[in-house]
Image: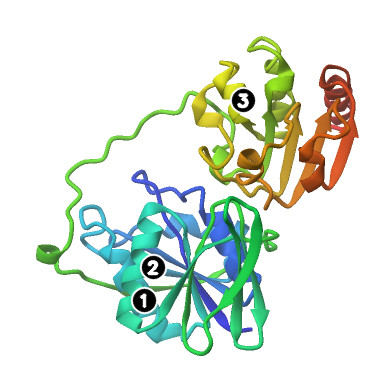
């Protein structure tokens, strides 16, 4: 299997970013995932177990003295050096603000191109084939680099099935950057989360509610099912506009785009703007009393019924199996 480099982003606290799972999954779908992590000298070794649990078969620690203050360039230097050392078929990075910047800079250095916002990867005749969901989710297209190195940015939460856990081998390289020609991070402020649920953008399971929940008080049914499944909570724009839930939970073209392994839609009609943000999910389950609701058109499983009757039974069934 060819090597596939996967850039692993970390938080300012030194833990893995939520994009790590989808990045490694995209790499594992087309080759041997080699995780590249930029760390301060002597740091990062405690991440090996977490990376192995996510399927990394090799871990390259790129030590950089300026990692905490240099913006983006340490990751570019790390991937550039790792390409020389591992001769990968492709490089996979998260489709984050920093990830897109890294991909563009690396493409210039290596004389290749970027396949952006990828939702699935596969192996083709010329190398890696990338699948994209475009025009608000109306179309699915494929692209590939015909010869040469492919650089892909992968949508958080996408990337395909999670690979099996491994015990990765490790190596260390040293990289440096010119601090006079790069942006400088002067300070970082971490905003505390008021929720113990998974991050919506990167969650493997999402339960979302729509206008069919009727009120803020009844929207708690979405939260109860989400907690039973260990899922994140999402919502349609209609639910947000009605004041049922905070706008940070909005899934859709003007909200968050998600691609979890499981997406459950409760009382959501399925307007195109909402489908654009979730229809690349692995398995979609919809519960709606309207048999003609558009959400059933993209669902793998559909239940025509009253959410206030069906969902409590579903929660009870889940809890009885614990």
Q: Which residue is mark 1?
A: 107
Marks 2,1: beta carbons within 8 A: yes
Q: Is residue 171 visible?
A: yes
Q: Nearer the viewer, residue 119 or 262?
A: 119
Q: Quadrant of the rendered structure where residue 102 is?
A: bottom left
Which callout, 3 or 1, points at the residue further toward the start of the chain?
A: 1
Residue 229's spot in the image, x, y percent? 74, 34
| Badge number at residue 103 | 2
**In-image side of 164 versus 144 (left or right):** right
Q: Residue at (14%, 69%) from the top-left corner? A: 178
Q: Nearer the viewer, residue 77 or 61?
A: 77
Q: Secondary structure at mark 1?
A: helix
Q: Residue at (75%, 36%) from the top-left corner? A: 264
Q: Residues within 10 Å of mark 2 (few under 14, many from 20)?
A: many
Q: Which residue is mark 3?
A: 238
Marks 3,2: beta carbons within 8 A: no
Residue 163's spot in the image, x, y percent? 68, 63
Q: Residue at (66%, 88%) from the top-left corner? A: 125
Q: Residue at (70%, 60%) from the top-left corner? A: 161
- Above or below — where is 138 with respect to 77? above
Q: Is residue 32 visible?
A: no
Q: Quadrant of the rendered structure where residue 50 is?
A: bottom right
Mark 2 to mark 1 CA distance (whole Å): 6 Å
Q: Secondary structure at mark 2?
A: helix
Marks 3,1: beta carbons within 8 A: no
Residue 172's spot in the image, x, y percent? 37, 73
Which callout, 3 or 2, points at the residue further toward the start of the chain?
A: 2
Mark 3 to mark 2 CA distance (whole Å): 35 Å
């Amino acid at each position: 299997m060819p090597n596939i480099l996967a850039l692993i982003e970390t938080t300012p606290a030194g833990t893995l970013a939520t994009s790590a799972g989808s990045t490694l999954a995209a790499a594992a779908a087309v080759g041997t995932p080699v995780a590249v992590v930029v760390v301060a000298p002597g740091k990062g070794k405690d991440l090996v177990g977490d990376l192995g649990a996510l399927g990394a078969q090799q871990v390259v620690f790129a030590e950089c003295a300026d990692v905490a203050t240099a913006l983006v360039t340490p990751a570019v230097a790390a991937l550039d050096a790792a390409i020389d050392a591992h001769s990968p078929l492709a490089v996979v990075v998260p489709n984050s603000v920093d990830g897109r910047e890294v991909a563009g800079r690396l493409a210039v250095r290596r004389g290749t191109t970027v396949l952006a916002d990828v939702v699935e990867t596969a192996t083709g005749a010329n190398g890696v084939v990338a699948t994209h969901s475009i025009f608000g989710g109306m179309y699915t297209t494929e692209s590939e680099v015909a010869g040469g190195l492919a650089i892909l940015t992968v949508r958080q939460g996408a990337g395909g099935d999670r690979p099996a856990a491994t015990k990765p081998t490790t190596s260390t390289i040293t990289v440096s950057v010119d601090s006079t020609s790069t942006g400088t991070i002067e300070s970082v402020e971490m905003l505390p989360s008021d929720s113990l649920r998974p991050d919506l953008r990167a969650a493997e399971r999402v339960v979302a509610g729509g206008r069919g929940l009727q009120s803020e008080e009844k929207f708690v049914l979405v939260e109860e099912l989400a907690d039973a499944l260990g899922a994140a909570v999402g919502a349609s724009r209609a639910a947000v506009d009605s004041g049922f839930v905070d706008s940070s939970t909005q899934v859709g073209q003007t909200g968050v785009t998600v691609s979890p392994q499981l997406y459950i839609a409760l009382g959501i009609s399925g307007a195109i703007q909402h489908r654009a943000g979730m229809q690349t999910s692995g398995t979609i389950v919809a519960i709606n009393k309207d048999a003609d609701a558009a959400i059933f058109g993209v669902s793998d499983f559909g239940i025509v019924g009253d959410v206030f009757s069906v969902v409590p039974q579903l929660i009870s069934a889940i809890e009885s199996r614990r």
